[in-house]
Image (tube, rainbow, N blue to C red):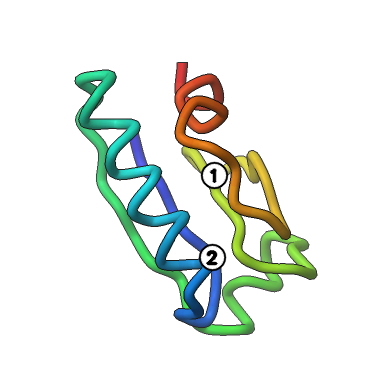
Amino acid sequence: MKIEILGMGCQKCNALYNLAKQATEELGIAAEFVKVEDFKEIMKYGVMTTPALVVDGKVKVAGKVPSKEEIKGMLK
């Protein structure tokens, strides 16, 4: 599984990264994590507000930091 965190490195982006990492660990999912901070790359996903969570190329959430439980639901 490839998980991308889209954002410019702000506090919310870092929080989303940490929550997603915790969620995969708790679910026992092996995942590759990538932080995408380049604005042009972020725009390729059609995301206008960050942070955003992308799982295997699909945008799951943008513009907010979901709870760890919500992230777990997106990963299942």
- Cβ–Cβ below 8 Å for labels 1 and 2? no
Q: State the CA–CA distance, disc 1 to disc 2.
A: 12 Å
Q: Nearer the viewer, residue 75 or 43?
A: 75
Comes first in the chain, label 1 or label 2: 2
Dot 1 crowding, Cα within 10 Å, few <14, some 14–19, many 20+: few
Q: Nearer the viewer, residue 70 or 46?
A: 70
**Is 49 left or right of 29, judged from the image as shown?**
right
The kind of residue tagged 1 is Gly
Residue 75 percent location from the top left of the image:
46, 25
**Is 7 left or right of 1, judged from the image as shown?**
right
Q: Which quadrant of the rendered structure holds the N terminus?
A: top left
Between label 1 and label 2, give the one nearer the viewer: 2
The kind of residue tagged 2 is Leu
**Please, is residue 69 above or below residue 31 in the view?**
above
Going 48% across and 74% down the picture, which residue do you hit?
11
**Please, is residue 68 above or below residue 38 in the view?**
above
The part of the image, by quadrant, that contains residue 26 is top left
Going 74% across and 63% down the picture, which residue do you hit?
47
Q: Secondary structure at mark 1?
A: loop
**Is 45 left or right of 72, judged from the image as shown?**
right
Q: Secondary structure at mark 2?
A: strand
Residue 31 percent location from the top left of the image:
26, 38
Which residue, given by chain and number where applicable, does mark 2 sit on? 6
The part of the image, by quadrant, that contains residue 57 is top right
Residue 42: mark: none
Residue 57: mark: 1
Going 47% across and 55% down the picture, which residue do you hit?
16
Residue 32 percent location from the top left of the image:
26, 46
Dot 2 crowding, Cα within 10 Å, few <14, some 14–19, many 20+: many
Going 47% across and 38% down the picture, which residue do you hit?
56
- How many discs mark residues in the rendered view? 2
